[in-house]
Image (cartoon, rainbow, N blue to C red):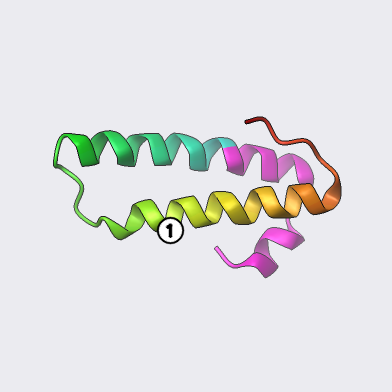
Amino acid sequence: MKISAVRETKTEELQGELDRLRRHLFDLRSQAVTEKLENPHNLTHTKRDIARVMTVMRERGVRAVG
């Protein structure tokens, strides 16, 4: 997900995307623990996507949960 695409997204959609990304990160972490994670780089990509979404939300003055 590129930052330009995140900036074009509405605030409500960003909150939903943030929830989805956090659930995805949780799933990836549990796969890593059970050694079923196929691509470890997905953890890094997901963390960065979460950071991008939170950055845009902070720029807009929206309080993100957590």
Is 36 left, or right, of 19 in this rendering? Answer: left
Look at the image and tell me in which quarter the N terminus lies: bottom right
Q: Picture coordinates of residue 33 (x, y %)? A: 20, 35
Q: Picture coordinates of residue 29 (x, y %)? A: 31, 38
Q: Residue furthest top?
A: 65
Look at the image and tell me in which quarter the C terminus lies: top right
Residue to which mark 1 is pinned: 45
Is 56 left, or right, of 25 in this rendering? Answer: right
Q: Is residue 14 magenta?
A: yes
Is 42 left, or right, of 31 in this rendering? Answer: right
- Relative to 17, is 6 above or below? below
The quadrant in which residue 45 appears is: bottom left
Q: Picture coordinates of residue 55 (x, y %)? A: 70, 53
- Relative to 26, is 7 above or below? below
Q: Nearer the viewer, residue 2 or 43?
A: 43
Q: Main secondary structure of the magenta part?
A: helix
Q: Residue furthest left?
A: 35
Q: Residue at x 14, y 41 (%)?
A: 35
Question: Which amino acid lies under the numbered mark 1 shown in the image of this protein?
Answer: His
Q: Residue at x 32, y 41 (%)?
A: 28
Disc 1 crowd rating (10 Å Cα; few below 14, some 14-19, many 20+) is few
Q: Picture coordinates of residue 16 (x, y %)? A: 63, 38
Q: How many marks?
A: 1
The quadrant in which residue 39 appears is: bottom left
- SS for tag 1? helix
Q: Residue at x 74, y 61 (%)?
A: 7
Q: Which residues are magenta?
A: 1-18
Q: Residue furthest right?
A: 61
Q: Is residue 15 magenta?
A: yes
